[in-house]
Each structure stands twice: as C-alpha cells, then as structure tokens.
Amino acid sequence: MSSKYSPCPCTSGKLYSKCCGPFHSGIELPPTALDLMRSRFAAFALGLTDYLVKTTHKDNPERKAEAADTEGSWKKDLESIASQARFDSLKILEFVDGDSRSEVTFRAFITKGEEDLSFTERSLFTREDGVWLYKEGSILN
Ligand SMILES: [Zn+2]
C-alpha cells in the first residue's frame, strides 16, 4: 500500500514517493497547508496516527479535550477511524493560501463497510516556526 511505487493514497495521481511519502517519513515538510491536508488524508488511509498527532495543533479542540482524559481517547479515536474506515478519495474544493494561516475546503470520500461516511470540511491551518499544523475543522454537511 505504501510502497514508493504505489499511487499516493491522497489520490493526487502521483506516486507515493513523489507525493506524501517524504512528508510521512519526515524527510520534507509540507510546503503549503494544502500539501499538509493531503498528507493527513493519506496518513488516515495508511493508519499513520503518529503523523496525525504530530501535525495537529496543540490547541485543536479534540486534542485539547484529551488533555483532561487519561484514556487518551482522541488518539484512540484516530486509530479506530484509520483502521476501520476506507479512505477512498479526496476532492479539494477550495484552497485559500496565506503566510501563517490557510484554509482548505475538501470532500473526503470514506466508507466503512456498506456505510458512506463521506463529508465536506473546511479546515483551518496555521504555520508556526515554518511548520504547518491542522488547527481545527468545521463540517459543512
Ligand atoms: Zn499524496
């Protein structure tokens, strides 16, 4: 699945090794919030929850909720979503770039068995010390 000769799970049409692979392995930083967003979708598809944690801002509401929760439910949620759902494809609807703040609106096509879990989200990203992070998202439907 994550072979360097495989198509990238973010469904860019590029090879994984020329797309999100270098971000997942830490060789490169995503240059834009859009690249980060794509790499997070691919990380869900591949079950790379450590990457999802690493790229989530510490002020993200779901992450903050975990601080008071000794069970670590936020990371467990990420793990269960990543392992149970199938991340079929990603469609970028809008990308508003900025130096330190950026917004990406996308539709994620996700299935879990027969169930359609697809959703549209507007995500907010912020850049701190040159590193883009996922701050928060609002579901649009
Ligand atoms: Zn990719």
Image (cartoon, rainbow, N blue to C red):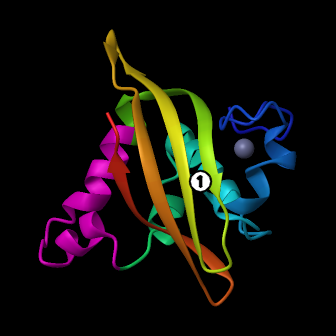
Q: Which residue is mark 1?
A: 37
Name the quadrant where ligand 1 sits. top right
Which residue is painted at 54% across and 37% down in the image? Answer: 45
Quarter location, residue 15:
top right
Which residue is painted at 20% across and 78% down in the image? Answer: 67
Which residue is painted at 27% across and 53% down in the image? Answer: 76
In the rendered image, residue 20, in percent from the top left (x then y), is placed at 73, 50
Pick the front one: 95 or 110: 95
Dot 1 surroundings within 10 Å: few (below 14), some, or many (20 or more)? many
| 28 magenta-colored | no
Q: Say left or right for 72 vs 86.
A: left
Span highlighted in magenta in the image: 59-81
Which residue is painted at 26% across and 60% down in the image? Answer: 74
In the rendered image, residue 46, in percent from the top left (x then y), is placed at 56, 41
Label 1 residue near ligand 1, CB within 8 Å: no
Quarter location, residue 30:
bottom right
> On the rendered image, what quadrant is the C terminus found in?
top left
